Amino acid sequence: MYKAKIFVNYKPSVLDPQAQAIHKALVRLGDDNVATVMMGKYFELTLTATDVDAATAQVDRICDRLLANVSMETYHFTVTPVGEATV
């Protein structure tokens, strides 16, 4: 079994009004040293794939088909065996 940790964010060229609102609020609260804010989505999947290559291919396919709108978002992920210590 493998665990996939997936992060999905807007592409840098896409306007993210929610992140801009958070940035403005941080500045108003005195945290004016925050240069940028990026919002995104986080997913964890546990897969019963036969090996890490099969799990990686499956996660990539799932991200392309369902979890990310690839015209507006990018994603990256890690795939590790279940039970392996992760940082």
Image (cartoon, rainbow, N blue to C red):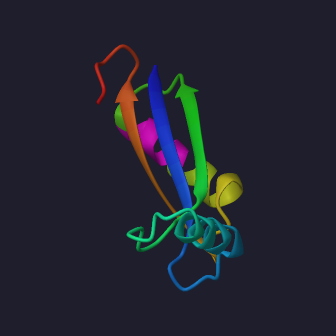
> Of residues 9 and 30, which is closer to you in this image?
30
Picture coordinates of residue 68, whole percent (x, y): 64, 60
Tell me where residue 22 sits by quadrant: bottom right
Residue drawn at 49 percent across, 27 percent down: 49
Picture coordinates of residue 50, whole percent (x, y): 44, 25
Apparent side of residue 62 relative to residue 37 in the rendered image (left or right): right
Based on the picture, tell me whether residue 54 belongs to the magenta stretch.
Answer: yes
Above-or-below relation of 65 to 19: above
Based on the picture, tell me whether residue 60 belongs to the magenta stretch.
Answer: no
Residue drawn at 53 percent across, 45 percent down: 59
Above-or-below relation of 18 to 57: below
> Of residues 55 and 36, which is closer to you in this image?
36
Residue drawn at 64 percent across, 76 percent down: 72
Tell me which segment is drawn in magenta.
53-59
Q: Quadrant of the C terminus?
A: top left
Picture coordinates of residue 18, whole percent (x, y): 69, 68
Q: Residue furthest top?
A: 83
Picture coordinates of residue 69, whole percent (x, y): 68, 67
> Of residues 71 and 60, which is closer to you in this image?
71
Apparent side of residue 82 relative to residue 28 in the rendered image (left or right): left
Above-or-below relation of 51 to 43: above
Apparent side of residue 12 relative to residue 35 in the rendered image (left or right): right
